[in-house]
Image (cartoon, rainbow, N blue to C red):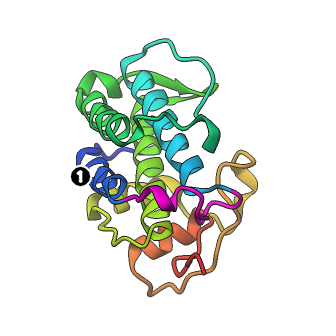
Protein backbone atom coordinates (compact mmCIF):
# COMPACT_ATOMS: atom_id res chain seq x y z
CA UNK A 1 0.00 0.00 0.00
CA UNK A 2 1.03 3.58 -0.68
CA UNK A 3 2.70 5.22 2.32
CA UNK A 4 4.08 8.37 0.70
CA UNK A 5 2.25 11.63 1.37
CA UNK A 6 1.86 13.35 -1.95
CA UNK A 7 1.25 16.95 -2.97
CA UNK A 8 -1.08 17.12 -5.97
CA UNK A 9 -0.39 20.84 -6.44
CA UNK A 10 2.63 20.71 -8.77
CA UNK A 11 0.94 18.29 -11.17
CA UNK A 12 -2.48 19.91 -11.10
CA UNK A 13 -0.79 23.24 -11.89
CA UNK A 14 1.10 21.68 -14.81
CA UNK A 15 -2.06 20.08 -16.17
CA UNK A 16 -3.90 23.41 -15.86
CA UNK A 17 -1.08 25.02 -17.87
CA UNK A 18 -1.60 22.40 -20.59
CA UNK A 19 -5.38 22.96 -20.55
CA UNK A 20 -4.76 26.68 -21.20
CA UNK A 21 -2.81 25.78 -24.35
CA UNK A 22 -5.53 23.67 -25.97
CA UNK A 23 -6.89 25.25 -29.13
CA UNK A 24 -10.52 25.06 -30.18
CA UNK A 25 -9.34 23.52 -33.46
CA UNK A 26 -7.79 20.60 -31.52
CA UNK A 27 -10.94 19.35 -29.74
CA UNK A 28 -11.60 16.62 -32.31
CA UNK A 29 -7.97 15.45 -32.45
CA UNK A 30 -7.03 11.96 -31.19
CA UNK A 31 -5.26 11.28 -27.90
CA UNK A 32 -3.18 8.35 -26.63
CA UNK A 33 -6.41 7.05 -25.02
CA UNK A 34 -7.88 4.80 -27.71
CA UNK A 35 -11.07 6.21 -29.19
CA UNK A 36 -10.93 9.35 -27.03
CA UNK A 37 -10.72 12.80 -28.62
CA UNK A 38 -9.21 15.84 -26.94
CA UNK A 39 -12.73 17.03 -26.05
CA UNK A 40 -13.60 13.65 -24.53
CA UNK A 41 -10.36 13.68 -22.53
CA UNK A 42 -11.15 17.18 -21.26
CA UNK A 43 -14.62 15.98 -20.24
CA UNK A 44 -13.00 13.06 -18.43
CA UNK A 45 -10.64 15.43 -16.57
CA UNK A 46 -13.55 17.70 -15.59
CA UNK A 47 -15.41 14.71 -14.14
CA UNK A 48 -12.50 13.00 -12.43
CA UNK A 49 -11.42 16.19 -10.67
CA UNK A 50 -14.90 16.46 -9.15
CA UNK A 51 -15.13 12.75 -8.29
CA UNK A 52 -11.73 12.64 -6.57
CA UNK A 53 -12.29 15.96 -4.78
CA UNK A 54 -15.60 14.61 -3.49
CA UNK A 55 -13.75 11.53 -2.24
CA UNK A 56 -11.25 13.70 -0.36
CA UNK A 57 -14.07 15.71 1.21
CA UNK A 58 -16.23 12.60 1.78
CA UNK A 59 -18.99 14.40 -0.10
CA UNK A 60 -21.80 12.61 -1.85
CA UNK A 61 -21.00 11.92 -5.51
CA UNK A 62 -22.78 9.34 -7.61
CA UNK A 63 -21.34 7.66 -10.65
CA UNK A 64 -17.94 8.32 -12.08
CA UNK A 65 -16.23 10.53 -14.62
CA UNK A 66 -17.35 10.23 -18.22
CA UNK A 67 -15.35 10.71 -21.39
CA UNK A 68 -17.95 12.16 -23.73
CA UNK A 69 -16.96 14.94 -26.12
CA UNK A 70 -20.62 15.98 -26.48
CA UNK A 71 -20.86 16.48 -22.70
CA UNK A 72 -17.84 18.78 -22.40
CA UNK A 73 -18.89 21.80 -20.34
CA UNK A 74 -18.88 24.97 -22.45
CA UNK A 75 -16.87 26.76 -19.74
CA UNK A 76 -14.20 24.04 -19.53
CA UNK A 77 -11.39 26.59 -19.99
CA UNK A 78 -12.18 28.16 -16.61
CA UNK A 79 -13.93 25.21 -14.95
CA UNK A 80 -11.13 22.67 -15.33
CA UNK A 81 -8.29 24.80 -13.90
CA UNK A 82 -10.52 25.71 -10.94
CA UNK A 83 -11.37 22.04 -10.37
CA UNK A 84 -7.72 21.02 -10.61
CA UNK A 85 -6.85 23.60 -7.97
CA UNK A 86 -9.74 22.48 -5.74
CA UNK A 87 -8.62 18.86 -6.11
CA UNK A 88 -5.11 19.68 -4.89
CA UNK A 89 -6.49 21.72 -2.01
CA UNK A 90 -8.89 18.98 -0.93
CA UNK A 91 -6.20 16.29 -0.84
CA UNK A 92 -3.81 18.72 0.86
CA UNK A 93 -5.94 18.54 4.00
CA UNK A 94 -4.38 15.87 6.28
CA UNK A 95 -7.88 14.74 7.31
CA UNK A 96 -8.57 13.75 3.69
CA UNK A 97 -5.97 10.97 3.97
CA UNK A 98 -7.55 9.31 7.01
CA UNK A 99 -9.81 6.28 6.77
CA UNK A 100 -11.20 5.14 3.45
CA UNK A 101 -12.36 7.04 0.37
CA UNK A 102 -14.55 5.96 -2.53
CA UNK A 103 -14.69 6.86 -6.22
CA UNK A 104 -17.03 5.19 -8.73
CA UNK A 105 -17.76 2.32 -6.36
CA UNK A 106 -14.09 1.61 -5.58
CA UNK A 107 -13.20 1.97 -1.90
CA UNK A 108 -9.54 2.28 -0.92
CA UNK A 109 -7.53 3.64 1.99
CA UNK A 110 -7.70 7.41 1.52
CA UNK A 111 -3.91 7.72 1.35
CA UNK A 112 -3.95 5.35 -1.63
CA UNK A 113 -6.91 7.12 -3.24
CA UNK A 114 -4.93 10.37 -3.11
CA UNK A 115 -2.22 8.76 -5.23
CA UNK A 116 -4.79 7.30 -7.61
CA UNK A 117 -6.10 10.86 -8.08
CA UNK A 118 -2.56 12.11 -8.65
CA UNK A 119 -1.91 9.35 -11.19
CA UNK A 120 -5.07 10.29 -13.09
CA UNK A 121 -3.96 13.92 -13.31
CA UNK A 122 -0.32 13.07 -14.07
CA UNK A 123 -1.00 10.59 -16.86
CA UNK A 124 -4.03 12.30 -18.41
CA UNK A 125 -2.14 15.60 -18.29
CA UNK A 126 0.52 13.96 -20.46
CA UNK A 127 -2.19 12.50 -22.73
CA UNK A 128 -3.56 16.00 -23.27
CA UNK A 129 -0.12 17.57 -23.77
CA UNK A 130 1.06 15.13 -26.43
CA UNK A 131 -2.32 15.19 -28.18
CA UNK A 132 -2.10 18.98 -28.49
CA UNK A 133 1.63 19.22 -29.25
CA UNK A 134 2.63 20.80 -25.96
CA UNK A 135 5.62 20.15 -23.70
CA UNK A 136 4.87 18.40 -20.41
CA UNK A 137 6.82 18.66 -17.19
CA UNK A 138 6.00 15.79 -14.82
CA UNK A 139 6.80 16.49 -11.18
CA UNK A 140 9.52 14.07 -10.01
CA UNK A 141 7.89 13.39 -6.62
CA UNK A 142 4.56 12.72 -8.36
CA UNK A 143 6.20 10.27 -10.78
CA UNK A 144 7.86 8.40 -7.89
CA UNK A 145 4.63 8.17 -5.89
CA UNK A 146 2.60 7.00 -8.91
CA UNK A 147 5.24 4.46 -9.97
CA UNK A 148 5.16 3.02 -6.44
CA UNK A 149 1.35 2.80 -6.57
CA UNK A 150 1.13 1.35 -10.10
CA UNK A 151 3.98 -1.10 -9.49
CA UNK A 152 5.25 -3.62 -11.99
CA UNK A 153 2.32 -4.70 -14.15
CA UNK A 154 4.06 -7.21 -16.34
CA UNK A 155 1.77 -9.76 -14.62
CA UNK A 156 -1.54 -7.86 -14.36
CA UNK A 157 -3.54 -10.90 -13.18
CA UNK A 158 -4.04 -9.45 -9.68
CA UNK A 159 -5.46 -6.08 -10.74
CA UNK A 160 -9.03 -5.10 -11.58
CA UNK A 161 -9.84 -5.46 -15.27
CA UNK A 162 -9.77 -2.22 -17.23
CA UNK A 163 -7.77 -0.24 -14.67
CA UNK A 164 -5.00 0.36 -17.23
CA UNK A 165 -4.34 -0.71 -20.79
CA UNK A 166 -1.90 -3.51 -21.54
CA UNK A 167 1.69 -2.74 -20.54
CA UNK A 168 3.76 -1.11 -23.29
CA UNK A 169 7.37 -2.36 -23.07
CA UNK A 170 9.79 0.44 -22.21
CA UNK A 171 13.53 -0.10 -21.69
CA UNK A 172 14.60 -0.45 -18.05
CA UNK A 173 17.02 2.45 -18.49
CA UNK A 174 14.33 4.82 -19.83
CA UNK A 175 13.41 7.86 -17.70
CA UNK A 176 11.12 7.08 -14.75
CA UNK A 177 8.14 8.88 -16.30
CA UNK A 178 8.47 6.94 -19.57
CA UNK A 179 8.50 3.69 -17.57
CA UNK A 180 5.38 4.81 -15.68
CA UNK A 181 3.64 5.62 -18.97
CA UNK A 182 4.46 2.13 -20.25
CA UNK A 183 3.10 0.56 -17.06
CA UNK A 184 -0.16 2.48 -17.52
CA UNK A 185 -0.53 1.22 -21.08
CA UNK A 186 0.88 4.17 -22.97
CA UNK A 187 3.59 4.43 -25.59
CA UNK A 188 5.89 7.24 -24.42
CA UNK A 189 6.67 7.95 -28.10
CA UNK A 190 3.00 8.37 -29.10
CA UNK A 191 2.19 11.00 -31.71
CA UNK A 192 -1.08 11.94 -33.36
CA UNK A 193 0.33 11.28 -36.85
- Please, what secondary structure does the residue beneath circle 1 have? helix
Q: Residue at x 47, y 23 (%)?
A: 100
Side of 180 where 134 appears, left or right:
left
- Viewer-side residue, 132 vs 32: 132
- Taking the view exactly as shown, the residue that stands out farthest to the front is 25
Q: Residue at coordinates 31% horizontally, 47% vertically from top-left?
A: 12
Report the number of discs. 1
Above or below, 82 against 128 in this view is: above
Q: Residue furthest top?
A: 60
Residue pictured at 29% horizontal, 34% vertical: 82
Q: Position of residue 46 (x, y in %)?
A: 46, 37
Residue 30 is inside the magenta segment: yes
Left or right position of 28 against 76: right
Q: Is residue 9 visible?
A: yes
In the rendered view, tell whether residue 83 sits above or below residue 35.
above
Instruction: Report whether 173 appears left or right of 40.
Output: left
Number of residues whose C-alpha sits closer than 10 Å to that of mark 1, classed few (under 14), some (14–19) or many (20 or more): some
Name the image quarter holding residue 141. Answer: bottom left
Q: Quadrant of residue 87?
A: top left
**Rendering coords of residue 152 (x, y %):** 57, 65
- In the picture of the structure, the residue carrying the numbered disc 1 is 10
Q: Is residue 134 above or below residue 115?
A: below
Q: Residue at x 53, y 41 (%)?
A: 43
**Front-lying residue, 76 or 146:** 76
Which quarter shows the C terminus? bottom right
Q: Is residue 141 left or right of residue 72?
A: left
Q: Is residue 68 visible?
A: no
Stretch of the chain drawn in magenta: 22-35
Q: Nearer the viewer, residue 187 or 71?
A: 71
- Residue 5 percent coordinates (x, y): 28, 43
Amino acid sequence: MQTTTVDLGPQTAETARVVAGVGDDQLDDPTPCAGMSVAALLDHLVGLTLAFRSAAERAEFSGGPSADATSLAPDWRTLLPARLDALATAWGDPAAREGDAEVAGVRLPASVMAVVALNEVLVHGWDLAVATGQPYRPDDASVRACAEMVGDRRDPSAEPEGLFGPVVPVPDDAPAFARLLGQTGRDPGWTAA
